[in-house]
């Protein structure tokens, strides 16, 4: 780990973790925020008196339309969270770190101020604020993922840890909900978050590069406080990184399908990566599992309210699960290396992703089965599996893309897979409407269909495993 001093790199790493865990993925705590909005009578005009009551008797109003409105806001926000990753990936690749982070700060601060000053009369502004909040958050995550390049062989661990922190930030809205119950109003909480934008600006100019952090890291690389020549220095280090790249190709993600011994390897284009079987099945894997998570978060608000005590205990484990996911990849990597196989490092790196992909699918299947059983105590297990599975999902997604495809296409490939999976996630609202309407609050048939779809996700790790075995076999013969 050459170049920038260890204290500076550690400061960048730790402040980045704080940024991701405190701001980036707050959307996933939506259920806690809905509790506050309902208390503040947002969209309460959509509730109707219970038409089944007779005479002068009164009872709880029918607020299905209110629930649908909150579900629609979450659907739009979660769609934007993923879909906008594609254009923002291009922005990050083209305009680099500083411009991307300033855009993120503008969106995030504007969103928090809108939420702070909105009321029941202006509740429709949530349709604007929540997407802006989520897009700003995903930009924070994208610009922080490159920090892993500062730590050499620990790069994959850092990327996974950041994704776990992103997942754990769902606890922020839970904390706001608890503060609200203790007397701190919603406006004060979101004004405080808005003021934190000054910290984001300071970190952008003091602890982050103006361009990209290269990998492999060249000698004497400097950035942030240590950068003497600004953009010119980073341009110089980028050139040095290109000189080092042939020596370090084995430690990078595979940039092409593995060639036979002695065969020259040609760089892969962006579109050849997109239309590869590997990328298409990864899209299916991500889309199905993510749809389950979004449907759970967006449609089970009443259940989440009943289980608030359980929710409080389960808001943070996502970040703690991230290193475990990296360990699952590391086990596969060490097993293959321990065999003394002459396989190339790129095959070993790709095969190390198989345990993580398979375990994520297994966790999602367990979560889906538990969520399909209408037994209240079992939902505690559902929460545990959902939190752990979500951490594995996003950490595994970013790590697999870094291992399986060229690093120069990472921003675009990451953005595209998130954008396409966002289109699939739009199904959550018609599914919610179907369950509430024609199925009369009985989601059994919907759950059975989604469980069957979840079984399809096991195809992806199987194909990756088979591909690695097939590519490894000729080299063993040689």
Image: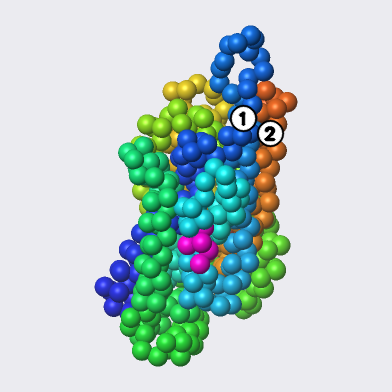
Using residue 40 as the reference point, say whether residue 81 is left or right of it: right
Please give the residue where the numbered disc 2 appears in the rendered image: 433
Q: Is residue 261 above or below residue 177?
A: below
At a point 46% along the width and 52% down the height, the residue shown is: 116
Please give the residue where the numbered disc 1 appears in the rendered image: 47
Q: Nearer the viewer, residue 106 or 119?
A: 119
| Residue 293 in the image, given as x and y percentages of width and height | 55, 41
At a point 55% along the width and 52% down the height, the residue shown is: 130
Using residue 324 as the reference point, say whether residue 257 is left or right of it: right
Quick check: can you spot residue 325? no
Q: Is residue 28 above or below residue 102?
A: above
Q: Based on the displayed image, in which of its 4 quarters is residue 330 positioned?
A: bottom left
Q: Give the Cα distance between marks 1 and 2.
A: 16 Å
Name the outermost residue toward the left. 7
Quarter that holds the C terminus: bottom right
Q: Is residue 146 above or below residue 320?
A: below
Neighbor class of circle 2 (other Cα within 10 Å; few <14, some 14-19, many 20+) is: some
Quick check: can you spot residue 101? yes
At a point 63% along the width and 67% down the height, the residue shown is: 87
Residue 155 among those drawn in magenta: no
| Residue 411 in the image, given as x and y percentages of width and height | 57, 68
| Residue 295 in the image, given as x and y percentages of width and height | 59, 39
In magenta, the rendered stretch is 106-111
Q: Is residue 157 above or below residue 121?
A: below
């Amino acid at each position: 780990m050459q170049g920038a001093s260890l204290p500076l790199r550690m400061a960048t790493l730790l402040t980045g973790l704080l940024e991701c865990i405190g701001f980036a993925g707050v959307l996933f705590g939506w259920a806690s925020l809905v509790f506050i909005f309902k208390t503040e009578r947002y969209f309460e005009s959509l509730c109707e008196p219970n038409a089944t009551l007779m005479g002068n008797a009164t009872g709880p109003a029918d607020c299905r339309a209110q629930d649908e409105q909150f579900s629609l806001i979450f659907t739009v926000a979660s769609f934007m969270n993923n879909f906008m990753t594609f254009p923002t990936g291009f922005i990050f690749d083209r305009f680099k770190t500083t411009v991307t982070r300033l855009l993120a700060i503008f969106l995030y601060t504007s969103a928090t101020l809108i939420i702070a000053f909105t009321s029941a009369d202006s509740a429709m502004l949530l349709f604007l604020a929540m997407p802006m909040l989520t897009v700003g958050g995903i930009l924070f995550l994208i610009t922080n993922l490159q920090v892993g390049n500062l730590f050499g062989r620990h790069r994959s661990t850092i990327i996974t840890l950041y994704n776990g922190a992103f997942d754990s930030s769902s606890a922020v809205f839970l904390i706001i909900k608890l503060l609200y119950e203790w007397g701190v109003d919603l406006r004060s909480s979101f004004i405080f978050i808005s003021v934190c934008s000054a910290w984001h600006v300071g970190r952008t100019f003091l602890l982050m590069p103006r361009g990209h952090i290269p990998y492999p890291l060249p000698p004497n690389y400097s950035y942030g406080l240590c950068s003497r020549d600004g953009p010119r220095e980073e341009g110089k280090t980028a050139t040095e990184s290109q000189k080092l790249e042939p020596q370090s190709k084995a430690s990078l993600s595979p940039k092409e399908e593995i060639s036979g011994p002695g065969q020259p390897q040609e760089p892969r284009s962006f579109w050849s990566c997109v239309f590869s079987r590997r990328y298409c099945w990864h899209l299916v894997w991500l889309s199905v599992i993510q749809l389950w998570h979004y449907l759970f978060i967006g449609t089970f608000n009443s259940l989440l309210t009943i289980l608030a005590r359980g929710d409080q205990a389960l808001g943070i484990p996502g970040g703690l699960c991230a290193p475990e996911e990296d360990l699952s990849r590391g086990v596969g990597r060490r097993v293959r290396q321990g065999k003394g196989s002459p396989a190339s490092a790129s095959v070993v790196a790709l095969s190390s992703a198989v345990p993580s992909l398979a375990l994520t699918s297994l966790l999602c299947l367990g979560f889906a089965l538990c969520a399909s059983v209408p037994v209240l105590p079992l939902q505690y297990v559902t929460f545990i599996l959902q939190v752990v599975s979500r951490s594995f999902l996003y950490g595994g997604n970013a790590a697999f893309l870094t291992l399986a495809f060229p690093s120069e296409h990472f921003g675009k490939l990451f953005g595209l897979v998130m954008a396409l999976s966002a289109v699939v996630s739009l199904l959550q609202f018609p599914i919610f409407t179907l369950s509430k309407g024609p199925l009369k609050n009985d989601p059994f048939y919907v759950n059975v269909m989604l469980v069957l779809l979840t079984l399809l996700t096991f195809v992806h790790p199987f194909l990756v495993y088979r591909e690695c075995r097939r590519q490894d076999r000729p080299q063993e013969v040689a």
